[in-house]
Amino acid sequence: MLRALRERLAESRQAFSSVFTNPNLRRVELSWAGTVCAYWIFIVALSLYAYEQGGASAVGLVGLLRVLPSLIATPFGTLLGDRFPRERVIVAINVARSVTIAGAAVAAFAGAPAGVVYALAGLMGLLQSTFRPTQAALLPLLARSPDELTAANLVLTTIESVGVFAGPAIGGLLLAVTGTDTVFAITGVVFLLAALLLVGVRAGPRSAPKYVEGGLLRQAFAGFGTVLHDARLRLIIGLYGTQTLAAGALNVLIVVLALQVLDLGKSGIGFLNSAVGIGGLIGGLGALTLIGRPRLASAFGLGLALVGLPLVILALVPHTATALVLLGIVGLGTTVVDVAGLTLLQRAVPDEVLTRVMGVVQTVFVGTLGLGAILAPVLIAGIGARGALAVTGGLLPVLALLARRPLRRLDETIAREPGNLELLRSIPIFRPLPPSTLEQLTHELQPLHLPAGREIIRQGGHGDRFYIVAAGEVDVRVDEQRSRTLHAGDFFGEIALLRDVPRTATVTALTDVDLLTLERDEFITAVTGHPESAEAAHAAIANRLASLRPDVASI
């Protein structure tokens, strides 16, 4: 068992290291480090600016302006990431953020009305709500394997945990020696540098976007439609949203815990929040074991329990040392939930709507965080602070237990690497496709067993499927003359699909044969949506026609 664990950790470290040897991912991670720090520096400076202009109520107004645009505009903003190259979209967003903050700096320098700065803060929130889903949807196109995708998510989560610490600290230091207007200008420069880093990112080919009929509104809300029609996505996002609901409540409960239950004073609020952050960083090391793990959904459920159970224990044993340790475990569990949940979604959602589905996730997160903050005072008033802690924490392990079987089924369908993935990679037509598209195709493959002598397709017939020989042999005849024999790993049926012509040969099972079939629409969408794959397909067709009938090789 220890040997197996060491081997898994070694593989995990290798995948983790590969993130930094992948030039595209390296640029994204470095850019993310800059933007996370810059964002929190901006938030600190903006909060101080608002307080100086209008006191605590102004700070609350700014907080609302940061959140409200994401609830309203996210479906429309994320549509950009599914219609245009995502690497270009995130560059444009970073440039727009830089310009927005520069505008805030100019307004502050010039003594413009505070409303101008607040409006720019609202625009900043809108841009932020578009950036994160687009970046999440871009990662599967940059990662070279499912393990590398998990590792990339882990690195991003770890960077964000560090940024939540470092950004406010740097912002505080800058504000100690300069003014809010200067800090605004500095963060604008950082966002611009982050955009320049992303200019060099080159994503792999994507499927052509599928537009939903019904105009812009229906296009924008296609992500919601995808989630509503997929039980797997409803399960992941629903559980994920429950965790953020608890996180929103915990933001309030920590204040009450520090001031009323543990009597730590105002500084205790910072200590308890820091414990959660430190636990998140430690959780990043623990989450290394998720890389290469075939049961991500089960790990997701375990992470939910790790977030909730410590709060229940803390309600029963409210001591300072215990609180610091238990809140650290909460942070650890949050990291596991983030990495496993995000990776599951990236691997389950079709690429053509991935940005919009990630926008749904962000909308749910923002909404549940706010709802949790509203519900916490109600719980405290009704059952006390310790009772509120117990209820908030107890909800998560109960839901994780109830969802255990669905999560196991989820592991069986999307969390483990499909058995036919290597077979698809061995076929020249599919080899250029990115891992995320290949994995989606494995779920579309349908097995077909036929006995020896059974005719599979007939020359002159209509083409509706693509075939891969998984086991056995098939006989290929053109005009009743034997042309060739295909074996395991070979394929046929692509000519009629891609050239929209009748079948060019008759194929019969020479032995008992196991086939994998792909329906016409799925095959054409995958192959023609990727230029390199389309080129490989046409080359394969030319070779196949030349071997079948030299006189039609140019058709």
Image (tube, grey):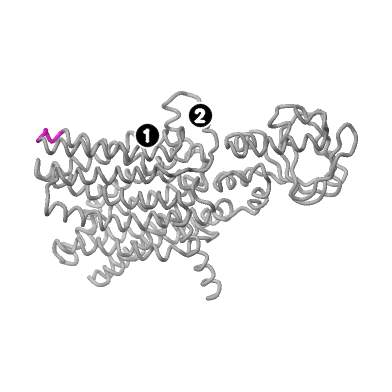
For residue 541, above or below residue 12:
above
For residue 86, above or below residue 331:
above
In the rendered image, the quadrant that contains the N terminus is bottom right
Residue 212 in percent (x, y) is at 50, 28
Q: Residue most toward the bottom?
A: 2
Q: Which residues are magenta?
A: 111-115
The circle on residue 211 is: 2
Are there few (<14), some (14-19), or many (20+) residues within 10 Å of tag 1? many
**Which residue has dot 1 on it?**
77
In the rendered image, the quadrant that contains the C terminus is top right
- Whether the magenta-drawn stretch holds residue 17 is answered as no
- Answer with the quarter of the image where residue 153 lies: bottom left
Q: Amino acid at mark 1?
A: Gly
- In space, the residues marked 1 and 2 are separated at their CA atoms by 16 Å
Q: Residue at x 56, y 45 (%)?
A: 434
The circle on residue 501 is: none
Residue 371 in percent (x, y) is at 29, 46
- Answer with the quarter of the image where residue 334 lies: bottom left
Q: Residue most toward the top?
A: 215
Q: Amino acid at mark 2?
A: Tyr
Mark 1 and 2 residues: CB-CB less than 8 Å, in contact?
A: no
Q: Earlier in the sequence, mark 1 or mark 2?
A: 1
Residue 36 in percent (x, y) is at 30, 50
Q: Residue at x 45, y 58 (%)?
A: 301
- Relative placement, left or right, of 372 versus 548 is left
Residue 267 in percent (x, y) is at 15, 63
